[in-house]
Image (cartoon, helix red, strand yellow):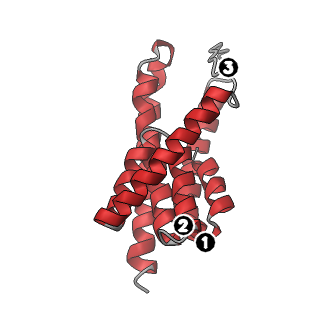
Amino acid sequence: MFFRNLIILAIFACGAVQTAILPLLAMTSVAGFWAFRNRRRAGAVEQNVTIDLGSPVSLKKVSGFAVLFLILQVVATLGQRWVGNAGFQIVSVLGGLVSSASTTAAAANMAMHGHVSASQAGVAVVLTSIASALADLPLVQRQPKLRPQMRELVLSSAFQMLLGGAILFAQFHWVGSG
């Protein structure tokens, strides 16, 4: 998800990548490390877990993405107008709880059209990615077959979010002020 959001941002708002690349790559690295670590541990034990996700390109899913993108675009624009940068970032976090891809696309689109700065869009994408990682935890908790892995997932997610947030903060605190 983190890497996908970075690619979406790069496609639509290349200038925003400068702000988002370090936190998103750090979070991707942590997720990759945890996945590789757990995969090696499970190598000796054959796990037969099947998850049916359906087609990612069904008309229903594409239409849902489009509607969500439109709603997020309107709400983010209104948030930006009425509350300023904080309103845009709040909408981005809330949007990440629903769909980080749609929220990333909306933030990138707003930056591409000059409604927000590239830096604001980069911050929004990092925040929406963090919110989305947090929102996935209750979904996993409800899967009985995955409950044994819940502790590991919570630790991994917490580390991803803290690292991404810390890097974002450091960029603005030290690099932004220099």
Residue at 49% across / 72% down in the picture?
A: 117
Which mark is on residue 15?
1
Provide residue 62's location: percent of width, then percent of height: 64, 35
Label 1 vs label 3, nearer the camera: 1
For the residue pair 137 and 10, the one nearer the viewer reads as 10
Please tell me which of labels 1 and 3 falls first in the chain: 1
Label 3 vs label 2, nearer the camera: 2
Which mark is on residue 1?
none
Q: Is residue 107 visible?
A: yes
For the residue pair 99 and 75, the one nearer the viewer reads as 75
Which mark is on residue 111?
2
**Residue type highlighted by circle 2:** Ala
Provide residue 51's location: percent of width, then percent of height: 62, 18
> Could you tell me if the residues under marks 1 and 2 are in contact, i.e. CB atoms within 8 Å?
yes
Q: Residues within 10 Å of mark 2 (few under 14, many from 20)?
A: many
Element at badge 2? helix
Tell me which corner region of the image, top left, top right, bottom left or bottom right, holds residue 13: bottom right
Provide residue 44's location: percent of width, then percent of height: 67, 19
| Quadrant where the C terminus is found in the figure | bottom left
Element at badge 1? helix
Please tell me which of labels 3 and 2 falls first in the chain: 3
Provide residue 35's location: percent of width, then percent of height: 60, 36
Element at badge 3? loop
For the residue pair 75 and 142, the one nearer the viewer reads as 75
Residue at 62% across / 27% down in the picture?
A: 60
